[in-house]
Image (cartoon, rainbow, N blue to C red):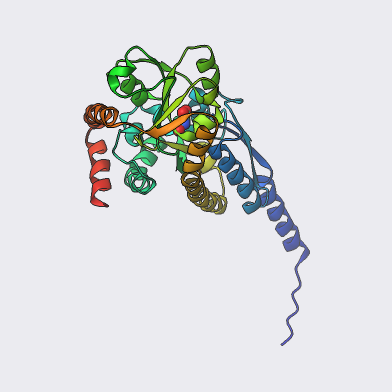
Amino acid sequence: MHVTKVLPAACAATAIAVLGLASASAGAETWDMPVAYADSNFHTQNAQAFADAVGVATQGAIEIVVHPSGSLFNGADIKRAVQTGQAPIGERLLSAHENENALFGFDSVPFLATSFEDSQRLWEAARPTIEEVLLEQNLVLLYAVPWPPQGLYFDREINSVADMEGIRFRAYNAATARMAELSGMTPVQIEAAELSQALATGVAQAFISSGSTGYDRKVWEQLSHFYEVNAWLPRNYVFVNKDTWDALDPALQATIRGVAMIAERAGTIDSERLTNWYMEQLAANGMTVQPAGDQLRTDLEAIGATMADEWLAAAGEQGQAIIDAYRAAE
Ligand code: PCA
């Protein structure tokens, strides 16, 4: 059978117009993406891989340009910048928003989830609630990746909480500031991007973080001890301005969601894979890396229990529901 298709001129013109429109509306949108952490950081590298993949998967319709180290917006300003549409997309430490809503601190409750497996289960329990809270703030969550487990950095040997008295402790969210207070230390909020300088000038003498940040900031230049505590695994999340998102063709939204799903998995695999490597780098650069001693561990667990109670009281029923869902999935 032979079928001749003759496209009437008017129809062709319409098709061209429609195609033209489609490529014009979908074409060459550039999204600046502020992130707070260094170029070399694994979250930043994962964000870059995500950006590249979005470019390929959307055939150039969305080009994401990653701006590391708080260079476009300071870490503390990234969420507001995306909420207000000053930037279409960004990445931030989720628990940095704990001050505005305790629910954002679900991943910084000491000793609630201390492994990658538990962190994943906790995230699955919390994600719908966090997505809802963000949506009310004009933000669409794309993906979230945990940092390696959190341990304590000091400029001296520490065997108990009593040994911490009076130390200036760099905090990165409300939970870390509270931990400092409960340990008799003085908290000072400092972005990771400013950490090396804060240590060099003595503004801070200690902090809690992953091996990743200790490595990125070369903290062995000032500090001598890392104590493995595995207190929690806080997450960075990537989010889009809701108006920007809603204006996208549903097919593009689906494509970006697919890439985001892969980015979440890939970033999580990197975080876990690099955990021991970071410990090795700290040790290779002269730090004493070891598990917290028995007394220190016992003291920290007592502080952790207080903080867990305080978090539940602040996070209310929705917080309890996250914990219940997490426990039920055990
Ligand atoms: N690094 C970030 C947050 C958690 C982490 O491991 C920081 O120290 O700022």
Q: Residue at x 33, y 44 (%)?
A: 122
- Expressed as whole percent of the image width and height from the top left, the position of residue 62 reads 63, 44
Residue 100 seen: no
Q: Position of residue 177 (x, y in %)?
A: 35, 20
Q: Is residue 237 visible?
A: yes
In the picture provided, is 33 more to the left or to the right than 122?
right
Query: Foreground residue, 241 or 166?
Result: 166
Label count reads: 0
Instruction: Tell which residue pokes out farthest to the bottom in this image.
Output: 1
Say above or below: 178 vs 22. Answer: above
Q: Quadrant of the N terminus?
A: bottom right
Closest to the observer, 291 or 275: 291
* Image coords of residue 130 (percent x, y): 37, 39
Q: Which residue is located at x 78 percent, y 63 percent?
A: 9
Picture quarter containing residue 244?
top right
Give how far across and how far down residue 55 sits, in percent: 65, 48
The image quadrant that residue 179 belongs to is: top left
Please tell me whether residue 186 is drawn above or below residue 239 in the rendered image: above
Q: Residue furthest right?
A: 9
Which residue lies at the image location 65% right of the left edge and 41% below the top edge?
Answer: 29
In the image: residue 247, left or right of residue 308: right
Figure check: 61 above or below 223 = below
- Residue nearer the viewer, 135 or 311: 311
Q: Is residue 298 left or right of residue 266?
A: left
- What residue appears at the point 37 percent right and 47 percent down from the top-left corner? 120
